[in-house]
Image (cartoon, rainbow, N blue to C red):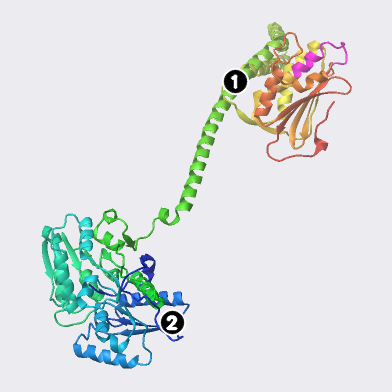
Amino acid sequence: MCWGGAFIRSRYAGLRLAVALCILSGGGEAASQALPMAGRVPRVLILYPYDERIVATTVAGEALRARLIQATNSKIDLFSEFLDLSRFPEPEHVARMGAYLAEKYADHRPDVVVALGKESASFIGKNRNSIAPGAKIVVAGFGSSAADKIGLSKDVLGAFSIFDILKTAQMARSLQPSARHLFIVGGSSDFDREWLASARNALSEFSAFYETTYLEDLTIDEFVDRAARVPADSIILALTVFKDRDGRNFIPREALRQIAMTANAPVYGPYETYLDHGVVGGSTVTFDALGQTVGNLVLDAIAGKPAQNVDAPQTYFADFRQLQRWGLSPSDLPPGTITVHREKSLWEEHWPIVSATFGVVVMQASAIAVLLLERRRRQAAESRARIHLMEAVHLNQSATAGALSSSIAHELNQPLSAIRNNAEAASELLRSGNPDLQLIQQILADIQEDDRRAGDIISRMRGLLKKRREIDWQEFDLNDITSSAIHIIRSEAERRGISLRATEPEGRLPVRADRVHVQQVVLNLATNAMDAMSGTGPTGKTLTFATGVANDRAALCVADTGTGIPEDALPTIFEPFYTTKQEGTGLGLSIARAIVETYGGAISAYNRPEGGAIFRMDLPLVGRKEANETNGLHRR
């Protein structure tokens, strides 16, 4: 079997298989000495069986030329002749062509003649002595059995290729296991008829499983019409159509394109040249690899190395677009099939990058999952801590209310007593004959004022004792909280003989926190300061409150004139259970620090040079920052 159809475009060159040659040393009937070339570069004549339109032989020839030029560093003379034996097979033409070439190369006798195709091999076999006497002959492009029929000399080297139609048929069966009809397409030239005869023999057993029909000796229009009307469960095997019944000459792949375009079933063929012209695929010998094989045989012949015939390897090929067109699964292709026109998946084309990206994503996802879990745990811990803080604050509030209960009761007794006295005075006036209504009106106003005072005292007490589960975020003026705390402790301070002083800057000190919590901190600091002054003399007891701006934060200082804080206790004074009081729990300052830090603030303590201690609380300002220290903190 020989050439069929034009070769696939050069962009498929990457799909062609490289051929590993088996050049054996030792015996054989090949030339064993270098060719005599009288100090000149070797001459190689390449005979093409058809014209230049048959791309298959052209590609094989170009691969051969490239191999020879590369191996000899261009120190070689290459000649090419297109015999055009498909369109002009007549003996007269063959004889004229032989005489013409003998005359043409009379002064440039080739050292090696390469005959591509059976027709070229037959031609040089008959005209060898006149065209290239003494030259080595290398043939290629057909099988060894065809070479025996031609009757080539034993010193001819061959790169034989078998276009096995049975393998193509088996490939079709693996893709279409449910097919019931088989159609074989062949033209009317001598080569077409030989191909059909060979296919009948090769497919004799295979075709027994199908209703088989040979579409032959038809016009091109009849081929197209018959292929369009085959049953859908059919396999169409296309051989070659060099000529149809009307004698029209074709490039086989162009004839196949017309047939496959409207065929009602998948079309298969044994030539790689049929790709891009409608075939699903087939088993073939790539012409590029064949040209490389022939090139190696020519180089061995030039060098006089022992060589023997070789077989070009076969491979399966498939067109992914046709697989999709007919709904055929690529997984049913024979192993090792070369699939063209298949866009690589992202994984196939960029698997290192995809793998790395996937790994990074997995790592990031894992890290995010861990962070989310940690965040959830932290939120749960913060929630539990907040609940514990709220409980501790409430207990501390209750303790503070208990400690201040006597002074609060005394403070509350004043407006209540005033209300009672005013009420008795009003009663006496009303019982008189001529009551002074203006005086009674003034007494009633005093009663209302005393009632308001009593209500304020009760409201402050209720705030101290109120228990909440969540923080009540509010924006308020730190000065207001300080004033409220001073009102609560005023009676207790008077009872202990302590003077209260307050210094406030001009303007507000807006902060955002839980109002009751901040007030509790101020009360804790104030009661601790009063306790610290209990061991001093009866005079000079002063409790000072100073507010202002320091380092862009709202600050409150509570200063006393007590005994101060032991220097070794300053680092641990805010730790839980630290206390200098016999009856103290050691939790007041610890709770105060927890409250202040909850709202982004800080609390500290240090001793005054003149005696006593200062506790300072800082909280973030809300809104406009004020860094002007002139309006800032005054310490006394």
* Marking on residue 243: none
Callout 2 secondary element: loop
Q: Is residue 197 visible?
A: yes
**Residue 156 appears left or right of 187:** right
2 vs 1, front mark: 2
Separation (CA) of disc 2 from disc 1: 97 Å
Q: What residue type is labelled 2?
A: Ile
- Residue that appears at 13% across and 73% down: 216
**Residue 97 appears left or right of 530:** left
Residue interval drawn in magenta: 526-544
Q: Is residue 531 found inside the magenta-colored segment of the image?
A: yes
Position of residue 133 relative to residue 259, above or below, is below
Callout 1 secondary element: helix
- Residue that appears at 27% across and 60% down: 323
* Marking on residue 388: 1
Q: Residue furthest right?
A: 610
Residues marked 2 and 1 touching at CB (< 8 Å): no
Give whichever of 481, 21 is nearer the camera: 21
* Marking on residue 76: 2
* Residue 274 location (% of width, % of height): 27, 70
**Residue 459 appears left or right of 90:** right
* Residue 23 location (% of width, % of height): 36, 67
